Amino acid sequence: MLFHVDPLAAEPIFEQIAFQVKGAVARGEMKPGDRLPSVRDLARTLAVNPNTVVKAYDVLTAEGVIVRRQGAGCFVTGAETTLGDAAREKRLAALVERTVTEAYHLGYGPAEVKEALTRALKEVRFPKAARGRSRRSS
Protein backbone atom coordinates (compact mmCIF):
# COMPACT_ATOMS: atom_id res chain seq x y z
CA MET A 1 0.00 0.00 0.00
CA LEU A 2 1.27 3.43 -0.88
CA PHE A 3 0.92 6.18 1.68
CA HIS A 4 1.02 9.88 0.96
CA VAL A 5 0.70 13.01 3.07
CA ASP A 6 -0.14 16.63 2.38
CA PRO A 7 1.99 18.86 4.59
CA LEU A 8 -0.27 21.81 3.73
CA ALA A 9 -3.48 20.11 4.84
CA ALA A 10 -5.27 21.27 7.96
CA GLU A 11 -5.25 17.70 9.29
CA PRO A 12 -2.04 16.75 11.12
CA ILE A 13 0.23 14.34 9.26
CA PHE A 14 -0.10 11.60 11.89
CA GLU A 15 -3.89 11.71 11.45
CA GLN A 16 -3.50 11.51 7.67
CA ILE A 17 -1.39 8.37 8.04
CA ALA A 18 -3.78 6.78 10.55
CA PHE A 19 -6.80 7.54 8.35
CA GLN A 20 -5.12 6.02 5.30
CA VAL A 21 -4.47 2.80 7.18
CA LYS A 22 -8.07 2.72 8.45
CA GLY A 23 -9.32 3.38 4.92
CA ALA A 24 -7.19 0.59 3.46
CA VAL A 25 -8.58 -1.82 6.05
CA ALA A 26 -12.16 -0.68 5.38
CA ARG A 27 -11.75 -1.15 1.63
CA GLY A 28 -10.19 -4.58 2.08
CA GLU A 29 -6.80 -3.45 0.72
CA MET A 30 -5.24 -4.45 4.04
CA LYS A 31 -6.42 -7.57 5.82
CA PRO A 32 -5.97 -8.95 9.33
CA GLY A 33 -2.39 -10.08 9.73
CA ASP A 34 -0.97 -7.72 7.12
CA ARG A 35 2.22 -6.01 8.26
CA LEU A 36 2.56 -2.24 8.14
CA PRO A 37 5.81 -0.62 7.05
CA SER A 38 8.32 -0.10 9.83
CA VAL A 39 8.34 3.33 11.45
CA ARG A 40 11.74 4.07 9.95
CA ASP A 41 10.78 2.95 6.43
CA LEU A 42 7.50 4.84 6.37
CA ALA A 43 9.09 8.00 7.80
CA ARG A 44 11.77 7.85 5.11
CA THR A 45 9.24 7.21 2.32
CA LEU A 46 7.02 10.10 3.41
CA ALA A 47 9.92 12.38 4.37
CA VAL A 48 8.48 12.94 7.85
CA ASN A 49 9.87 12.68 11.35
CA PRO A 50 9.74 9.10 12.69
CA ASN A 51 7.91 10.43 15.76
CA THR A 52 5.04 11.39 13.45
CA VAL A 53 4.71 7.77 12.28
CA VAL A 54 4.99 6.55 15.88
CA LYS A 55 2.12 8.86 16.83
CA ALA A 56 -0.02 7.52 13.96
CA TYR A 57 0.73 3.94 14.98
CA ASP A 58 -0.06 4.83 18.62
CA VAL A 59 -3.49 6.10 17.56
CA LEU A 60 -4.14 2.97 15.50
CA THR A 61 -3.02 0.75 18.38
CA ALA A 62 -5.24 2.59 20.87
CA GLU A 63 -8.22 2.19 18.53
CA GLY A 64 -7.51 -1.53 18.07
CA VAL A 65 -6.86 -1.26 14.33
CA ILE A 66 -3.30 -2.56 14.63
CA VAL A 67 -1.26 -4.50 17.15
CA ARG A 68 2.44 -4.16 17.84
CA ARG A 69 4.54 -7.29 18.19
CA GLN A 70 7.90 -6.69 19.80
CA GLY A 71 10.65 -7.20 17.26
CA ALA A 72 8.21 -8.15 14.48
CA GLY A 73 6.42 -4.89 13.67
CA CYS A 74 2.84 -3.65 13.48
CA PHE A 75 0.03 -5.75 12.06
CA VAL A 76 -3.64 -5.20 11.16
CA THR A 77 -5.84 -6.82 13.81
CA GLY A 78 -9.21 -7.13 12.14
CA ALA A 79 -10.72 -6.60 15.59
CA GLU A 80 -13.93 -4.70 16.05
CA THR A 81 -14.21 -1.66 18.26
CA THR A 82 -14.60 -2.10 21.99
CA LEU A 83 -16.77 1.02 22.24
CA GLY A 84 -20.28 0.58 23.55
CA ASP A 85 -23.35 1.33 21.43
CA ALA A 86 -23.89 4.81 22.89
CA ALA A 87 -20.28 5.85 22.29
CA ARG A 88 -20.34 4.43 18.76
CA GLU A 89 -23.56 6.27 17.94
CA LYS A 90 -22.15 9.53 19.33
CA ARG A 91 -19.01 9.24 17.20
CA LEU A 92 -21.01 8.37 14.09
CA ALA A 93 -23.31 11.36 14.62
CA ALA A 94 -20.30 13.65 14.98
CA LEU A 95 -18.73 12.28 11.79
CA VAL A 96 -21.94 12.69 9.82
CA GLU A 97 -22.46 16.23 11.15
CA ARG A 98 -18.93 17.19 10.17
CA THR A 99 -19.35 15.71 6.69
CA VAL A 100 -22.68 17.45 6.09
CA THR A 101 -21.36 20.78 7.38
CA GLU A 102 -18.27 20.60 5.16
CA ALA A 103 -20.41 19.59 2.16
CA TYR A 104 -22.70 22.59 2.78
CA HIS A 105 -19.74 24.94 2.79
CA LEU A 106 -18.49 23.41 -0.45
CA GLY A 107 -21.84 24.22 -2.03
CA TYR A 108 -23.34 20.73 -2.21
CA GLY A 109 -26.99 19.92 -1.65
CA PRO A 110 -28.60 16.93 0.09
CA ALA A 111 -28.91 14.83 -3.09
CA GLU A 112 -25.23 15.27 -3.91
CA VAL A 113 -24.21 14.39 -0.36
CA LYS A 114 -26.37 11.23 -0.45
CA GLU A 115 -24.84 10.24 -3.78
CA ALA A 116 -21.30 10.75 -2.48
CA LEU A 117 -22.10 8.77 0.66
CA THR A 118 -23.58 5.94 -1.41
CA ARG A 119 -20.44 5.80 -3.56
CA ALA A 120 -18.22 5.75 -0.47
CA LEU A 121 -20.30 2.99 1.15
CA LYS A 122 -19.88 0.81 -1.93
CA GLU A 123 -16.08 0.97 -1.55
CA VAL A 124 -16.11 -0.32 2.02
CA ARG A 125 -16.14 -4.01 2.80
CA PHE A 126 -18.28 -4.15 5.93
CA PRO A 127 -17.94 -7.24 8.14
CA LYS A 128 -21.05 -9.42 8.03
CA ALA A 129 -21.61 -8.83 11.76
CA ALA A 130 -21.75 -5.06 11.25
CA ARG A 131 -24.11 -5.01 8.29
CA GLY A 132 -27.32 -5.19 10.30
CA ARG A 133 -26.13 -4.60 13.84
CA SER A 134 -27.43 -1.05 14.27
CA ARG A 135 -30.81 -1.46 12.62
CA ARG A 136 -33.61 -0.45 14.93
CA SER A 137 -37.29 -0.93 14.53
CA SER A 138 -39.35 2.25 14.58
Image: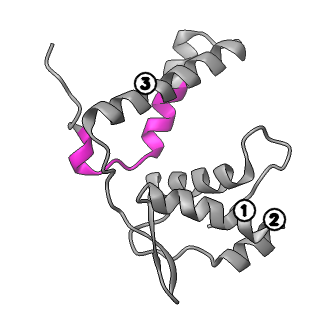
Circle nearer the N terminus (2, 3): 2
In this rendering, does residue 85 appear at all?
yes
Residue 73 is inside the magenta segment: no
On screen, 32 above or below 22?
Answer: below
Report helix, strand or loop for mark 1. helix
The magenta span reads 116-131
Q: Which residue type carries mark 2?
A: Val
Q: Residue at x 69, y 62 (%)?
A: 3
Q: Distance between the residues labelled 1 and 2?
A: 7 Å
Percent of width and height locating residue 69:
45, 81
Mark 2 highlights which residue? Answer: 48
Kindly state the secondary structure of the residue where label 2 is placed.
Answer: loop
Q: Is the magenta stretch mostly helix, strand or loop?
A: helix
Residue 14: numbered disc: none
Marks 3 and 1 in Cβ contact (< 8 Å): no
**Foreground: disc 1 or disc 2:** 1
Mark 3: few/some/many CA within 10 Å (<14, 14-19, 20+): few
Tell me the kind of residue under disc 3. Answer: Ala
Residue indicated by mark 1: 52
Q: Which of marks 3 and 1 is nearer the N terminus?
A: 1
Q: How far apart are marks 2 and 3 (CA)?
A: 33 Å
The residues bearing labels 3 and 1 have C-alpha atoms spaced at a distance of: 28 Å
- As drawn, the label of residue 93 is 3
Label 1 close to label 2 by CB (< 8 Å): yes
Note whether 19 is above or below 101 in the view shown.
below
Q: Which residue lies furthest to the left in this view?
A: 137
Going 80% across and 67% down the picture, which residue do you hit?
49
Q: Is residue 131 above or below residue 103?
A: below
Residues packed near mark 2 inside 10 Å, few (<14), some (14 to 19) or many (20 plus): some
Left or right, 92 with respect to 102, comes to left
